[in-house]
Amino acid sequence: MSSEIDHQEIEEVKFYGLPKGTVLWPTATFAIIFGILAKINPSWEDSLSIAFLIIFTLNLLILYFEFSRGAVMGIAGIIFGLLILYLWLQDTRDVPSIGIEAGLRGASGDFLITFGAILLIMIFLGIIVKRTFDYFVVTRNELIRKHGILGDAQRFSAQHMVFHKQINDVFESLLLGGSGTLTVIPPGKADIFIIENVPRINEVERKLSYLLSKLEVDTT
């Protein structure tokens, strides 16, 4: 990717932050898939409902908590350790199976499909609004922030602009196409913009670095 950037002229870089709820797209997708499977075979409703609740719960954990690289390794170790302990207790102490499905009545296929469709539509609408009405553009001369339905704009000189990239949540970054947080500091530091969930943030960083380096060369 970097070689492609080095051999092409970049006139501007546009970027935006995805809505926080975009990370729930796996819940919406699996809800529709499980709903279709439940309609094909209603006897699967209980098992599919349990699987849906597990995915939904994990998705909510990713939404509400940040998982750094260290936290991911720690959580994986804890889960693996608890699983080994449970299997060992089952073999040596005759621990009964959990049996969650015993007291859970499955959701219908229509419910799962409707839930997933509504959530997926909301996610798509949120992304469209962000891309259309709330975004940033960096050219060789200026930084432009567009926001609002009426197209309000703020303009800053691109010279001496500073930006920082952060990827605080491993799972969120993976689910949102390599997203991360981009902090943009225009000259004078009067305004500091913190844009969360910028998709393909490594590519955005490379393009910004290339464009701003060209700006420095042109102005010297």
Image (spheres, rainbow, N blue to C red):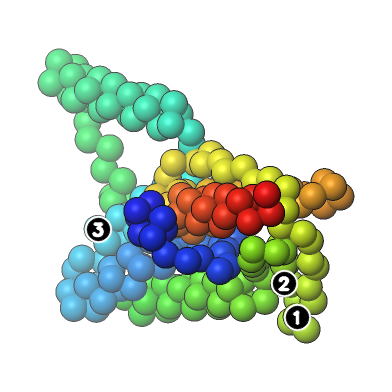
Residue 47: image tag? 3
Q: Could you tell me if residue 184 is visible in this image? A: no
Q: Is residue 118 above or below residue 96?
A: below
What residue is at 42 percent from the left and 45 percent from the top? 171
Q: Quadrant of residue 65?
A: top right
Q: CA distance from mark 1 to mark 3?
A: 48 Å
Q: Could you tell me if residue 110 is visible in this image? A: yes
Left or right relative to 123: residue 159 = right
Q: Which residue is mark 2?
A: 146
Q: Which residue is mark 1?
A: 151
Q: Residue 83, image x and y in percent?
A: 25, 27
Q: Residue 153, image x and y in percent?
A: 78, 73
Quadrant (top left, top right, bottom left, bottom right) of the N terminus: bottom left
Q: Amino acid at mark 2?
A: Lys
Question: Which is more toward the observer, 189 or 125?
Answer: 189
What residue is at 19 percent from the left and 25 percent from the top? 87
Q: How many residues crowd mark 1 within 10 Å: few (<14), some (14–19), many (20+)?
A: few
Check disc 2 and report its element: helix, strand or loop.
Answer: strand
Q: Amino acid at mark 1?
A: Gly
What residue is at 43 percent from the left and 31 percent from the top? 69
Q: Residue 218, image x and y in percent?
A: 63, 56
Q: Residue furthest top?
A: 92
Left or right relative to 4: residue 118 = right
